[in-house]
Image (cartoon, helix red, strand yellow):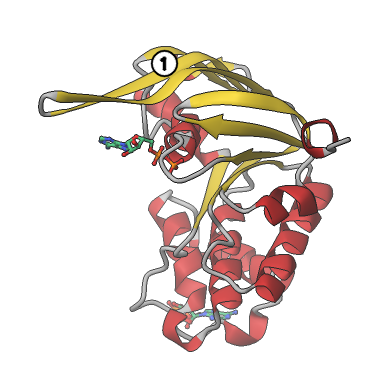
Amino acid sequence: MITFNNISKVYNSGAQTITALDQVTLEIKEGEIFGVIGFSGAGKSTLLRCVNALETPSEGEVLVGGDLLATLSPKQLRKKRKTIGMIFQHFNLLQAKTVFDNIAIPLYLLGYKKRDVKNKVRELLSFVELSEQAHKYPDQLSGGQKQRVGIARALATDPSILLCDEATSALDPQTTSSILALLKKINAAYNITILIITHEMNVIQEICDSVAVMENGRVIETGSVFDVFAYP
Ligand code: ADP
Ligand code: ADP
Protein backbone atom coordinates (compact mmCIF):
# COMPACT_ATOMS: atom_id res chain seq x y z
CA MET A 1 0.00 0.00 0.00
CA ILE A 2 2.92 2.32 0.82
CA THR A 3 6.42 1.76 -0.50
CA PHE A 4 9.46 3.83 0.40
CA ASN A 5 12.12 2.92 -2.10
CA ASN A 6 15.56 4.03 -0.95
CA ILE A 7 14.41 7.54 0.00
CA SER A 8 16.66 10.23 1.41
CA LYS A 9 15.78 13.74 2.52
CA VAL A 10 18.39 16.43 2.98
CA TYR A 11 17.53 19.86 4.37
CA ASN A 12 19.78 22.77 3.62
CA SER A 13 19.56 25.33 6.39
CA GLY A 14 22.15 28.02 5.76
CA ALA A 15 25.62 26.51 5.58
CA GLN A 16 24.39 23.34 7.31
CA THR A 17 22.93 20.28 5.66
CA ILE A 18 20.78 17.95 7.73
CA THR A 19 20.09 14.42 6.56
CA ALA A 20 16.62 13.74 7.95
CA LEU A 21 16.18 10.49 5.99
CA ASP A 22 19.06 8.32 4.85
CA GLN A 23 18.22 5.64 2.27
CA VAL A 24 15.02 4.38 3.83
CA THR A 25 13.37 1.36 2.25
CA LEU A 26 10.11 0.04 3.74
CA GLU A 27 7.00 -1.75 2.54
CA ILE A 28 3.69 -1.23 4.34
CA LYS A 29 1.06 -3.75 3.34
CA GLU A 30 -2.63 -3.11 2.84
CA GLY A 31 -4.65 -3.52 6.03
CA GLU A 32 -1.61 -3.48 8.26
CA ILE A 33 -1.01 -1.36 11.38
CA PHE A 34 2.61 -0.32 10.95
CA GLY A 35 4.55 1.55 13.64
CA VAL A 36 7.69 3.62 13.27
CA ILE A 37 9.48 4.19 16.56
CA GLY A 38 12.54 6.27 17.40
CA PHE A 39 13.79 9.18 19.46
CA SER A 40 13.06 12.79 18.63
CA GLY A 41 14.98 13.85 15.51
CA ALA A 42 15.19 10.31 14.09
CA GLY A 43 13.30 11.30 10.93
CA LYS A 44 9.87 9.82 11.71
CA SER A 45 7.70 12.81 10.88
CA THR A 46 9.68 13.57 7.73
CA LEU A 47 8.99 9.99 6.64
CA LEU A 48 5.29 10.28 7.44
CA ARG A 49 4.98 13.55 5.54
CA CYS A 50 6.43 11.93 2.43
CA VAL A 51 3.31 9.74 2.22
CA ASN A 52 0.93 12.63 1.53
CA ALA A 53 3.60 14.64 -0.29
CA LEU A 54 3.85 17.33 2.38
CA GLU A 55 7.54 16.55 1.90
CA THR A 56 9.27 15.46 -1.26
CA PRO A 57 12.28 13.18 -0.88
CA SER A 58 15.60 14.44 -2.24
CA GLU A 59 16.22 10.97 -3.62
CA GLY A 60 14.29 7.75 -4.05
CA GLU A 61 10.64 6.90 -4.70
CA VAL A 62 7.41 6.86 -2.71
CA LEU A 63 4.53 4.74 -4.00
CA VAL A 64 1.05 5.03 -2.49
CA GLY A 65 -1.66 2.62 -3.64
CA GLY A 66 0.57 1.64 -6.56
CA ASP A 67 1.14 5.20 -7.78
CA LEU A 68 4.53 6.85 -7.86
CA LEU A 69 3.83 10.18 -6.13
CA ALA A 70 6.46 12.12 -8.09
CA THR A 71 4.67 11.38 -11.36
CA LEU A 72 1.18 12.57 -10.30
CA SER A 73 -0.30 15.76 -11.72
CA PRO A 74 -1.60 18.35 -9.22
CA LYS A 75 -5.14 17.09 -9.86
CA GLN A 76 -4.14 13.45 -9.37
CA LEU A 77 -2.29 14.42 -6.19
CA ARG A 78 -5.39 16.12 -4.77
CA LYS A 79 -7.35 12.96 -5.49
CA LYS A 80 -4.66 10.83 -3.87
CA ARG A 81 -4.67 13.00 -0.75
CA LYS A 82 -8.38 12.30 -0.25
CA THR A 83 -7.39 8.65 0.20
CA ILE A 84 -5.03 9.59 3.05
CA GLY A 85 -6.28 10.83 6.43
CA MET A 86 -4.02 12.25 9.11
CA ILE A 87 -4.24 12.82 12.86
CA PHE A 88 -1.89 14.89 15.01
CA GLN A 89 -0.38 15.08 18.49
CA HIS A 90 -2.09 18.40 19.27
CA PHE A 91 -5.26 17.54 17.30
CA ASN A 92 -5.12 20.67 15.08
CA LEU A 93 -8.81 21.55 15.51
CA LEU A 94 -10.35 24.93 14.65
CA GLN A 95 -10.91 26.44 18.09
CA ALA A 96 -13.63 28.86 16.95
CA LYS A 97 -15.69 26.11 15.32
CA THR A 98 -17.96 23.43 16.78
CA VAL A 99 -17.13 19.75 16.72
CA PHE A 100 -19.68 19.35 13.92
CA ASP A 101 -18.11 22.11 11.82
CA ASN A 102 -14.56 20.89 12.43
CA ILE A 103 -15.53 17.73 10.58
CA ALA A 104 -17.85 19.39 8.06
CA ILE A 105 -15.68 22.30 6.88
CA PRO A 106 -12.96 20.23 5.18
CA LEU A 107 -15.69 18.36 3.30
CA TYR A 108 -17.29 21.62 2.11
CA LEU A 109 -13.86 22.83 0.99
CA LEU A 110 -13.46 19.64 -1.02
CA GLY A 111 -16.73 20.42 -2.79
CA TYR A 112 -19.03 17.88 -1.12
CA LYS A 113 -22.75 18.72 -1.20
CA LYS A 114 -24.44 20.04 1.92
CA ARG A 115 -26.79 17.09 2.42
CA ASP A 116 -23.96 14.60 1.95
CA VAL A 117 -21.78 16.51 4.40
CA LYS A 118 -24.44 16.53 7.10
CA ASN A 119 -25.17 12.82 6.73
CA LYS A 120 -21.49 11.97 6.73
CA VAL A 121 -20.73 14.09 9.80
CA ARG A 122 -23.62 12.55 11.75
CA GLU A 123 -22.46 9.06 10.83
CA LEU A 124 -18.87 9.85 11.86
CA LEU A 125 -19.90 11.45 15.16
CA SER A 126 -21.86 8.35 15.99
CA PHE A 127 -18.92 6.10 15.06
CA VAL A 128 -16.52 7.97 17.38
CA GLU A 129 -19.27 8.29 20.05
CA LEU A 130 -19.41 12.07 20.06
CA SER A 131 -22.98 12.71 18.87
CA GLU A 132 -23.79 14.41 22.18
CA GLN A 133 -20.82 16.80 21.76
CA ALA A 134 -21.64 17.98 18.22
CA HIS A 135 -22.36 21.57 19.24
CA LYS A 136 -19.50 21.95 21.69
CA TYR A 137 -16.25 23.77 20.98
CA PRO A 138 -12.83 22.10 21.24
CA ASP A 139 -11.95 23.80 24.54
CA GLN A 140 -15.02 22.18 26.10
CA LEU A 141 -13.68 18.69 25.34
CA SER A 142 -11.20 16.35 27.01
CA GLY A 143 -7.99 15.41 25.18
CA GLY A 144 -9.39 12.04 24.20
CA GLN A 145 -12.57 13.63 22.85
CA LYS A 146 -10.51 16.13 20.84
CA GLN A 147 -8.54 13.29 19.29
CA ARG A 148 -11.79 11.51 18.43
CA VAL A 149 -12.88 14.65 16.57
CA GLY A 150 -9.52 14.54 14.77
CA ILE A 151 -10.14 10.90 13.88
CA ALA A 152 -13.67 11.62 12.61
CA ARG A 153 -12.32 14.46 10.46
CA ALA A 154 -9.56 12.22 9.09
CA LEU A 155 -12.09 9.54 8.14
CA ALA A 156 -14.50 11.96 6.45
CA THR A 157 -13.22 11.34 2.92
CA ASP A 158 -13.29 7.53 3.37
CA PRO A 159 -9.51 7.20 3.17
CA SER A 160 -7.70 3.89 2.65
CA ILE A 161 -4.70 5.09 4.70
CA LEU A 162 -4.59 6.80 8.09
CA LEU A 163 -1.38 8.56 9.16
CA CYS A 164 -0.94 9.06 12.91
CA ASP A 165 1.66 11.63 14.00
CA GLU A 166 2.35 11.04 17.73
CA ALA A 167 -1.43 10.85 18.06
CA THR A 168 -1.45 9.68 21.68
CA SER A 169 1.63 11.50 22.97
CA ALA A 170 -0.41 14.28 24.61
CA LEU A 171 -2.81 11.84 26.30
CA ASP A 172 -2.72 9.99 29.64
CA PRO A 173 -2.24 6.19 29.58
CA GLN A 174 -5.93 5.32 29.98
CA THR A 175 -7.02 7.73 27.21
CA THR A 176 -4.16 6.46 25.05
CA SER A 177 -5.53 2.93 25.36
CA SER A 178 -9.02 4.02 24.37
CA ILE A 179 -7.70 5.88 21.30
CA LEU A 180 -5.56 2.88 20.32
CA ALA A 181 -8.64 0.65 20.67
CA LEU A 182 -10.54 3.00 18.36
CA LEU A 183 -7.73 2.86 15.79
CA LYS A 184 -7.85 -0.91 15.94
CA LYS A 185 -11.61 -0.83 15.42
CA ILE A 186 -11.15 1.45 12.37
CA ASN A 187 -8.50 -0.87 10.95
CA ALA A 188 -10.77 -3.89 11.40
CA ALA A 189 -14.03 -2.27 10.29
CA TYR A 190 -12.78 -0.52 7.15
CA ASN A 191 -9.52 -2.35 6.38
CA ILE A 192 -7.72 1.00 6.57
CA THR A 193 -3.94 0.75 6.51
CA ILE A 194 -2.58 2.64 9.51
CA LEU A 195 0.91 4.16 9.73
CA ILE A 196 1.82 5.33 13.22
CA ILE A 197 4.89 7.30 14.25
CA THR A 198 5.63 7.38 17.94
CA HIS A 199 8.35 7.48 20.56
CA GLU A 200 6.21 5.32 22.87
CA MET A 201 6.93 1.61 23.02
CA ASN A 202 3.52 0.76 24.49
CA VAL A 203 1.81 2.11 21.34
CA ILE A 204 3.84 -0.31 19.20
CA GLN A 205 3.16 -3.22 21.54
CA GLU A 206 -0.56 -2.53 21.94
CA ILE A 207 -1.68 -2.34 18.32
CA CYS A 208 1.05 -2.60 15.68
CA ASP A 209 1.55 -5.65 13.46
CA SER A 210 4.92 -4.52 12.12
CA VAL A 211 7.49 -2.00 13.23
CA ALA A 212 10.50 -0.10 11.96
CA VAL A 213 13.03 1.35 14.37
CA MET A 214 14.61 4.60 13.20
CA GLU A 215 17.82 6.27 14.31
CA ASN A 216 19.55 9.25 12.69
CA GLY A 217 17.44 9.04 9.54
CA ARG A 218 18.00 5.34 9.04
CA VAL A 219 15.86 2.28 9.60
CA ILE A 220 18.03 0.18 11.87
CA GLU A 221 15.59 -2.70 12.27
CA THR A 222 12.24 -3.76 10.81
CA GLY A 223 9.91 -6.74 10.95
CA SER A 224 6.93 -8.04 12.86
CA VAL A 225 6.59 -6.55 16.35
CA PHE A 226 7.02 -10.05 17.73
CA ASP A 227 10.29 -10.65 15.87
CA VAL A 228 11.79 -7.23 16.56
CA PHE A 229 10.89 -6.97 20.24
CA ALA A 230 10.70 -10.57 21.48
CA TYR A 231 13.99 -10.68 23.36
CA PRO A 232 15.27 -14.16 24.22
P1 ADP B 1 11.23 12.98 14.34
O1 ADP B 1 9.86 13.06 13.79
O2 ADP B 1 11.74 11.59 14.47
O3 ADP B 1 11.42 13.78 15.60
P2 ADP B 1 11.95 14.74 12.13
O4 ADP B 1 11.59 14.04 10.89
O5 ADP B 1 11.03 15.79 12.65
O6 ADP B 1 12.24 13.65 13.27
O7 ADP B 1 13.38 15.42 11.97
C1 ADP B 1 14.53 14.72 11.47
C2 ADP B 1 15.69 15.70 11.37
O8 ADP B 1 15.42 16.63 10.33
C3 ADP B 1 15.92 16.53 12.62
O9 ADP B 1 17.31 16.72 12.76
C4 ADP B 1 15.21 17.82 12.32
O10 ADP B 1 15.80 18.89 13.03
C5 ADP B 1 15.42 17.95 10.82
N1 ADP B 1 14.36 18.72 10.14
C6 ADP B 1 13.04 18.36 10.07
N2 ADP B 1 12.34 19.24 9.35
C7 ADP B 1 13.24 20.18 8.94
C8 ADP B 1 13.15 21.38 8.14
N3 ADP B 1 12.00 21.76 7.61
N4 ADP B 1 14.29 22.08 7.94
C9 ADP B 1 15.46 21.68 8.45
N5 ADP B 1 15.61 20.58 9.20
C10 ADP B 1 14.52 19.83 9.45
P1 ADP C 1 -28.60 25.69 7.70
O1 ADP C 1 -29.23 26.67 8.60
O2 ADP C 1 -27.28 26.14 7.11
O3 ADP C 1 -29.49 25.03 6.70
P2 ADP C 1 -28.70 23.84 9.91
O4 ADP C 1 -29.65 24.78 10.56
O5 ADP C 1 -29.14 22.47 9.60
O6 ADP C 1 -28.10 24.45 8.58
O7 ADP C 1 -27.38 23.75 10.77
C1 ADP C 1 -26.77 24.89 11.28
C2 ADP C 1 -25.52 24.45 12.02
O8 ADP C 1 -25.88 23.44 12.98
C3 ADP C 1 -24.49 23.79 11.12
O9 ADP C 1 -23.50 24.70 10.67
C4 ADP C 1 -23.86 22.77 12.01
O10 ADP C 1 -22.80 23.32 12.75
C5 ADP C 1 -24.91 22.41 13.00
N1 ADP C 1 -25.56 21.11 12.74
C6 ADP C 1 -26.39 20.76 11.75
N2 ADP C 1 -26.79 19.50 11.87
C7 ADP C 1 -26.22 19.03 12.99
C8 ADP C 1 -26.25 17.78 13.69
N3 ADP C 1 -26.93 16.72 13.30
N4 ADP C 1 -25.53 17.66 14.81
C9 ADP C 1 -24.83 18.69 15.25
N5 ADP C 1 -24.75 19.89 14.64
C10 ADP C 1 -25.46 20.06 13.54
Horizontal side of residue 96 vs 210, given as left or right:
left
Q: Quadrant of the C terminus?
A: top right
Against 227, is 96 above or below? below
Q: Is mark 1 within 8 Å of ligand 1?
A: no
| Image quadrant occupied by the N terminus | top right
Judge by depth and name the residue closer to the eye, 166 or 55: 166
Q: Residue shown at 41%/40% (left/top)?
A: 41
- Res 97 quadrant in image: bottom left
Residue drawn at point x = 45 percent, y = 69 percent: 102
Q: Position of residue 82 (x, y in %)?
A: 52, 40
Looking at the image, residue 144 sits to the left or right of residue 138; the answer is: right
Determine if residue 72 is in view: no
- Mark 1, residue position: 70
Q: Secondary structure at mark 1?
A: helix
How far from the left and from the top, in percent, is residue 84? 55, 40
Q: Nearer the viewer, residue 159 or 210?
A: 210
Residue displayed at 66% across by 80% down: 131
Return the x and y of residue 51 as percentages of the image width and height. Answer: 50, 31
Q: Find residue 132 and report its image quarter.
A: bottom right
Q: Where in the figure is residue 28, as x and y percent of width and height?
A: 68, 27
In which of the image's four quarters is ligand 1 placed? Answer: top left
Side of 51 where 196 appears, left or right: right
Mark 1 is on which residue type?
Answer: Ala
In the image, 222: left or right of 14?
Answer: right
